[in-house]
Every structure is written in structure tokens, then in C-alpha cells.
Image: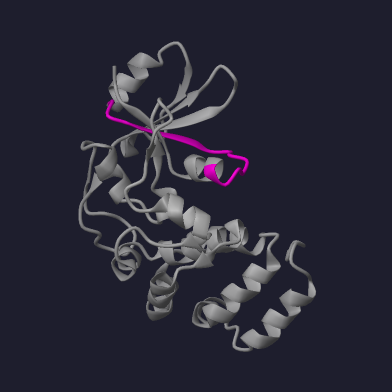
Amino acid sequence: GFSAFLVGGCVRDAILKRECNDIDIATNATTAQMLEIFDSYETQTAGIGFGTVNVRGKSGNIFDITSFRQEGEYIDGRHPSSVTFSGDIHTDLSRRDFTVNSMAVNRHAELVDDYGGLHDCTARQIKTVRTATVRFSEDYLRILRALRFSAVLDFSVEQQTAEAINELSHLCAKIPPERTFEELRKLFSTPYNLRLSDILATFPDIFNILFGITDVKKTVERIKKLGSKTNFI
């Protein structure tokens, strides 16, 4: 009786024909209604304060089901001042970081793509939803997420998005260390070392800020010698 959409990474990965490990669903149901609907299933409620209930399907897969969200103004470079569990799928998609992560599919396999995510999957590029400088200023971690998705998906970074990253690279110093570590762990574990070398060369200030890497050219050449599809770490 409620609306429900597959959203985010699982939609992107299906389009790219990549294996999907995380299945996210957005719905207009409240968490109380979700728990009632799935009362015969194994559920986890650690994320209930964020509007999320985790449901283990009969196949064993975990589904993260979250109420539609609207976010208030960001106040500290990481968190919105308020979160409201309301709205519709279009409102929910508008708060997401990158176009390739802002697509949804309903139960009729119809794609909701308000921000051109399908085009950017085809073009193999990372682009922010709406204005890049605004999205990165709201949440500094999105800067590292852009680099990580570029590396993991072997995508380029769209020009205006790249310009905003370079302009705001100094904000990376304000990201909590544990979040920085997790993003960089994924970034440096990519099999696409030529993409990684391009990232280092295109955004040298970030790696100088985080690691004190000043000789980017030497680092890039070292990565290129490893080949295009070998693990950097």
C-alpha cells in the first residue's frame, strides 16, 4: 500500500552491469509502518533514528529501507540542521550527492532520473546533483567521495565538478580522520591505477593537504608503472 523505489548505488550498478552488494529502498512508509509490514522478517533498527530499517530477505540479502527524507540547511560541513521524513521520491533524490547515485526504479521497472544520471553513466563521468560548489560546501566528505567514485568506477570527473573540487580542496582538512581514512582506503584499493594516477595529477592539492605529497609527478609515474589493472595496495 506504500510507494517504494530501488535507489542509489544498486540502480547505478545495474545500469553499469556491475555486481551490486548494497540494496537501498526509499519509501513513503514510516519506520513504524515498516516494522509492522515486516514483522515476520528479521529486522535491525540501529538506523531507525535516520529513518532506516534493515530487513533480511528470504534469500538472505539485507535491504536498507528508508523513509523519504528532506534535509535542512547544512551547518557544520557534514550534517544538515534538520531531517524531515516526508516528501516524495523527487524530493528524496534532490538531496543526493552525484547524478549517478540519484536515480530510482519503481516496481514496474520505470526509471526516475531527474538529474541526468543515466546520461552520466553512459558518459562515464562523476557530476554533482545541482551546483558543485554548493554540494561540496554542504558536506566536505563529498569531495573525497567524488574522487573515490571516479577511481572505483573508472569514471572521469565532469569539468565544473572538478573545478569545484580544486577550489574547495582545503576543506578536506576538516573532514573527521576516520571518514577520510575510509574513503581513501577504497580509493587506493581500486584496480584502475591509471585512473588513480589521473586523480592524483588533477587534484594535487588534496593529496598535499592530506599526506604532504608535493612531488605528484613522481607519484603518478610510480602508479603508471604498476599498470592499469593491478592493486595499488
Membership of 218 in magenta stretch = no
User: Could you say which is closer to the camera, residue 224 or residue 14?
Assistant: 14
Membership of 21 in magenta stretch = yes
Relative to 91, residue 2 above or below? above
Report whether residue 51 is seen. Answer: yes
Relative to 213, residue 16 above or below? above
Task: Give how far across and how far down residue 34 sits, in percent.
Answer: 34, 22
Which colour assignment does the render follow? one colour
Relative to 132, residue 222 above or below? below
Give me the residue at 46% from left, 57% from top. Answer: 120
Report whether residue 69 is seen. Answer: no
Task: Give how far across and how far down residue 18 sits, in percent.
Answer: 61, 44
Quadrant of the image containing the N terminus: top left
The secondary structure that most of the magenta stretch takes on is loop
Relative to 61, residue 146 above or below? below
Tally of numbered discs = 0
**In the rendered image, which quarter is residue 170 located in?**
bottom left
Give me the residue at 49% from left, 68% from top. Answer: 157
Task: Give how far across and how far down residue 192 sits, in percent.
Answer: 68, 63
Give me the residue at 57% from left, 47% from top. Answer: 16
User: Could you say which is closer to the camera, residue 139 or residue 59?
Assistant: 59
Find the magenta span and give its range: 15-29
User: Could you say which is closer to the camera, residue 154 or residue 211?
Assistant: 154
Task: Give how far across and how far down residue 74 sits, in percent.
Answer: 25, 59
Give me the residue at 64% from left, 64% from top. Answer: 188
Quadrant of the image containing the C terminus: bottom right
